[in-house]
């Protein structure tokens, strides 16, 4: 993919979107579709924050140029031209990253890629809002991922050993408004969420587009991630495990659409969305998710119910 024009220094007003833009930059080669939607989210959010101040207008104009260049390069990609495909692609990618981090955490394999993935998964769930409101499940994943990244980072900062899994989180405690997460992030760890506007401590605005990210920092669940030996943290290579395919309802094999079933346009749209989700899951060799979504689509089309 051709290099994009460099952005001007980030205006202070846009502090809350800087990490979404950095995530976009990190994915320019790894997954251009993810990079595109991260920039689109930043653009939409930036327009709401400040589209009148000269420095903000200049920044947004350059960001729009990047979006147009990316859209031209990805013009034949269905994840860009079709909203349903793009939504499924982004949601599956974010979920894979979240599951990778969660599996590592629950297995007690503390490494900095895991912490980074928790944090980035929360940013990508933000980005999903370009397609509409988040599901309750995604809201919970985002809140947990941000809390976990903050919790583990603070434990490391204080010389404490983090507890694996969802220990200590309170459902009524809004993680995004935690103001005491600290002000100086560690260079090799992800920036810590402290509020809805994250502190850019390790990202000087004057060198916004020159950020270097270690390889494997965003490995989804099916991608082995390795921590450089100099990181000082023990890393275990993720071994592929056999996938468990969900049980298939035998009734679906002989199901014929009932004569009195009347499907609405919304039903057809939901069925199409399930099929797109299944296709996107197969891109990550996620058989279980693909089968579950295909079953949902088949049941909806044959019974009119989910």
Image (cartoon, rainbow, N blue to C red):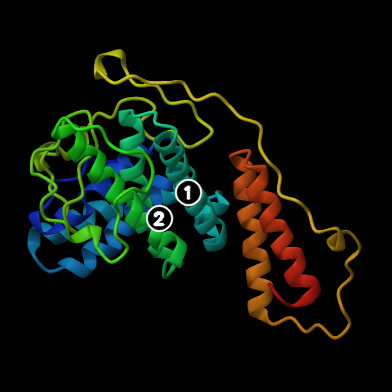
Determine the residue positioned at 24% across, 63% down.
Answer: 174
**Drawn side of residue 271 relative to residue 37, left or right:** right
Determine the residue positioned at 91% across, 63% down.
Answer: 254
Q: Earlier in the sequence, mark 1 or mark 2?
A: 1
Q: Position of residue 286 (x, y in %)?
A: 62, 42
Q: Locate the N terminus by quadrant.
A: top left
Residue wearing tag 1: 95
Determine the residue positioned at 31% across, 44% down.
Answer: 119
Q: What crowding class fits label 2: few (fewer than 14 Cα within 10 Å), some (14-19), or many (20 or more)?
A: many
Quarter occupied by residue 243: top right
Q: Secondary structure at mark 1?
A: helix
Q: Secondary structure at mark 2?
A: helix
Q: Position of residue 9 (x, y in %)?
A: 12, 45
Residue wearing tag 2: 141
Q: Locate the C terminus by quadrant.
A: bottom right
Res. 253 visible in picture? yes
Toward the top, the furthest residue is: 229
Q: What crowding class fits label 1: few (fewer than 14 Cα within 10 Å), some (14-19), or many (20 or more)?
A: many
Determine the residue positioned at 69% across, 82% down.
Answer: 264
Q: Are marks 1 and 2 in contact (CB under 8 Å)?
A: yes
Res. 67 visible in picture? no
Depth order, front residue of 192/152: 152
C-alpha separation, residue under disc 1 versus residue under disc 2: 8 Å
**Drawn side of residue 151 relative to residue 77, left or right:** left
Q: Position of residue 191 (x, y in %)?
A: 20, 41
Quarter occupied by residue 214: top left
């Amino acid at each position: 993919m051709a290099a994009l024009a460099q952005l001007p220094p980030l205006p202070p007003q846009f502090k809350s979107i800087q990490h979404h833009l950095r995530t976009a930059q990190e994915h320019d080669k790894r997954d251009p579709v993810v990079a595109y939607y991260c920039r689109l989210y930043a653009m939409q959010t930036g327009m709401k924050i400040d589209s009148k101040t000269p420095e903000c207008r200049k920044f947004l104009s350059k960001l729009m140029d990047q979006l147009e260049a990316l859209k031209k390069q990805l013009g034949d990609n269905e994840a860009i031209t079709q909203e349903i495909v793009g939504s499924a692609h982004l949601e599956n990618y974010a979920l894979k990253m979240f599951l990778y981090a969660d599996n590592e955490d629950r297995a007690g394999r503390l490494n900095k890629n895991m912490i980074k993935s928790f944090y980035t998964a929360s940013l990508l769930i933000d980005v999903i809002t370009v397609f509409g409101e988040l599901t309750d499940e995604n809201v919970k994943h985002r809140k947990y991922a941000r809390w976990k990244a903050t919790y583990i980072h603070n434990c490391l900062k204080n010389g404490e050993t983090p507890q694996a899994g969802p220990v200590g989180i309170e459902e009524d405690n809004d993680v995004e408004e935690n103001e005491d997460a600290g002000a100086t992030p560690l260079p090799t760890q992800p920036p810590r969420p402290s509020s809805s506007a994250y502190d850019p401590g390790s990202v000087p605005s004057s060198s916004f587009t020159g950020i270097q990210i270690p390889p494997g920092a965003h490995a989804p669940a099916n991608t082995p991630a390795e921590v450089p030996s100099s990181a000082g943290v023990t890393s275990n290579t993720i071994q592929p495990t056999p996938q468990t395919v969900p049980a298939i309802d035998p009734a679906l094999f002989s199901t014929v659409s009932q004569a009195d079933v009347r499907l609405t346009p919304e039903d057809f749209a939901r069925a199409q969305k399930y099929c797109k989700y299944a296709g996107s899951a197969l891109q990550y060799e996620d058989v279980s998710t693909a089968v579950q979504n295909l079953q949902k689509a088949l049941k909806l089309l044959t019974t009119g119910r989910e």
